[in-house]
Image (tube, rainbow, N blue to C red):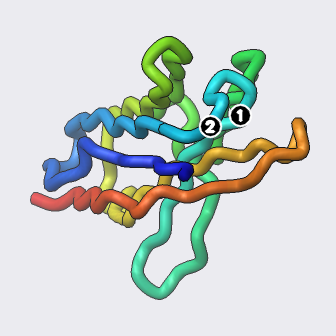
Amino acid sequence: QVQLVESGGGLVQPGGSLRLSCTASGVIFSIYTMGWYRQAPGKQRELVATTTSGGTTKFADSVKDRFTISRDNAKNTVYLDMNSLKPEDTAVYYCNADGSMYLKGNYWGQGTQVTVSS
């Protein structure tokens, strides 16, 4: 059974920082492309950042130079470090594990709320 468990969301003031974590179980973590997506109220879910099994990263233009994605294969965990947060970063953040490159499944976490407000 595959599980992705996110943590680290919360309320932060504009300009602040947060670190999100996502720990996976039931998958061969190291081969999966891991990603973070977000969905704000009334909007579609959008890509925030991804990191491939080889460590190649990709970011949405809106978060480049502010967010960092990293992974620790020994801990089956992917992180999203968010700096200089803006109110428009407010959303539910979802962890994603994409194994399609190796004909494996695609999985989502339950989401964690990030609210940026003064």
Q: Secondary structure under badge 2?
A: loop
Q: Residue at x 77, y 42 (%)?
A: 99
Q: Is residue 86 above or below residue 59?
A: below
Query: Is residue 115 in sight in this rendering?
Result: yes
Q: Looking at the image, which is closer to me, 89 or 70?
A: 70
Real-space Cα distance between discs 2 and 1? 8 Å
Marks 2 and 1 close (CB-CB < 8 Å): yes
Crowding at dot 1, Cα within 10 Å, few <14 / some 14-19 / many 20+, comes out as: many
Position in image of residue 25 (x %, y %) = 49, 38
Residue 15: quadrant of the picture: top left
- Which amino acid type is shown beneath numbered disc 1? Tyr
Dot label at residue 27: 2
Reading the image, the residue beneath label 1 is: 32
Check the image and name the residue furthest to the bottom. 42
Position in image of residue 102 (x %, y %) = 88, 37
Q: Residue at x 89, y 39 (%)?
A: 101
